[in-house]
Amino acid sequence: MYAQHAPLPSPSQGGGISRAVKSPLALKTAPQPPKMAYLAVRALADEACLTPKPGLVDRRGPGAHTDMNLKMMLRSAHSLFHCFREIAEAAAAMRPSRGAREKLAAIGRRGEEAMLGATGGTNTHKGAIWTLGLLTAGAVMASEPGNPCEIASLAGKIARFSDRMMPDTVTNGIRAKSRYGARGARGQAEMGFPHVVNVGLPALHASRECGNTEDEARLDALLAIMAELDDTCLLHRGGALMLQMVKAGARGIRLAGGVSASEGQRRLHRLEAKMLKTNASPGGSADLLAATIFLDSLFGATGNPIQTRR
């Protein structure tokens, strides 16, 4: 396996991240905005560096992508520090409302501009800005900052409000949602991120409890999400047949014992070969893995026990 954590920028590199900040943090309250932004950026960077991820950019190469690589993904993640910090600062004085939705969305759109500037116009993290931005706001608003259910519920309440300033842009995700009826990133948020709270986090913790390495636990969490999510990135690239191929492959790996088992590793290699051949990349699942890592880091930061919905 590969190194667990991705490199993060020092304050001198423009990230504004304190050298004293470490994860997990032994706090009983929500981290301050710079620390919250640190955790969000770190989640994106750790997701990008996690290896081997089928069809996705990782330390080995670009996966099924032709327009991005790991260096770009890290540059993109680091460019979003100020966006997440501004979201955390704004959310501290808010509760879920249309006003909060519109203010946070405006910050997110500025974050998208920073991301596109850092990547030369490539959309690396638009979905992750939406997902982690909402969860950052939810974590700041939560009465129990380490409770992922409360955080995700608050994020969902924000997402369900309309945004009168939203650009009238038809994205690939919207096209896939319209054609196949998938809920997409917006639906996932409006429902309170069930694939994070009830799929990703339990799989992550169960894998750790089995004695697996952190990389193995995170890969198991990714596969759990892939096995269940109607990923609009896959639907856009290859339709329902591609989605079902990836879901079935991910379920097979989990049934074989996950990535730490020899048969699980063989099945992972076979699935990845199929995904690369068909240009399949589960970008929606990758965003939700980053969200899983982020919420898990808040659990560690506050020391509160993990809770999932029944």
Image (tube, rainbow, N blue to C red):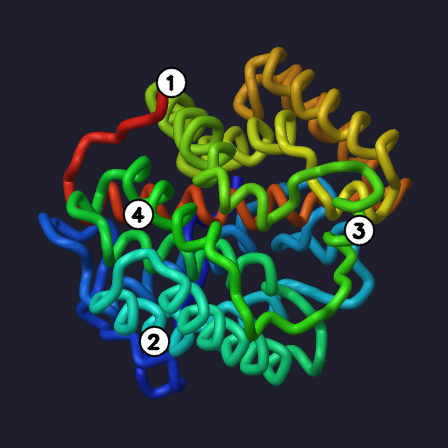
Q: Earlier in the sequence, mark 4 or mark 1?
A: 1
Q: Earlier in the sequence, mark 4 or mark 2?
A: 2
Residue 219 visible somewhere in the drawing? yes
Disc 2 is placed on an element classified as: helix
Residue 274 visible somewhere in the drawing? no
Residue 18 placement, left or right of 254: left
Q: Earlier in the sequence, mark 3 or mark 4?
A: 3
From the image, state whether disc 4 or disc 1 is nearer to you: 4
From the image, state whether disc 1 or disc 2 is nearer to you: 2
Q: Would you say the residues marked 3 and 1 are in contact, meaning their CB atoms lie under 8 Å apart?
A: no
Q: Would you say the residues marked 1 and 2 are in contact, meaning their CB atoms lie under 8 Å apart?
A: no
Disc 1 is placed on an element classified as: loop
- Distance CA(mark 3)–CA(mark 1): 31 Å
Residue topped by disc 2: 86
Residue topped by disc 1: 210
Q: Earlier in the sequence, mark 1 or mark 2?
A: 2
- Distance CA(mark 1)–CA(mark 2): 38 Å
User: How many tags in the picture?
Assistant: 4
Residue 280 position, x and y percent, is 81, 43
Residue 123 position, x and y percent, is 68, 69
Residue 297: image tag:
4
- Callout 4: 10 Å neighbours few (<14), some, many (20+)? many
- Callout 1: 10 Å neighbours few (<14), some, many (20+)? few
Residue topped by disc 3: 64
**Amino acid under disc 2:** Glu
Q: Earlier in the sequence, mark 3 or mark 2?
A: 3
Disc 3 is placed on an element classified as: loop
When the figure is inspected, residue 114 is found, relative to residue 264, above or below; the finding is below
Residue under the point 61% across and 55% down = 59
Residue under the point 82% across and 48% down = 236
**Amino acid under disc 1:** Cys
From the image, state whether disc 3 or disc 1 is nearer to you: 3
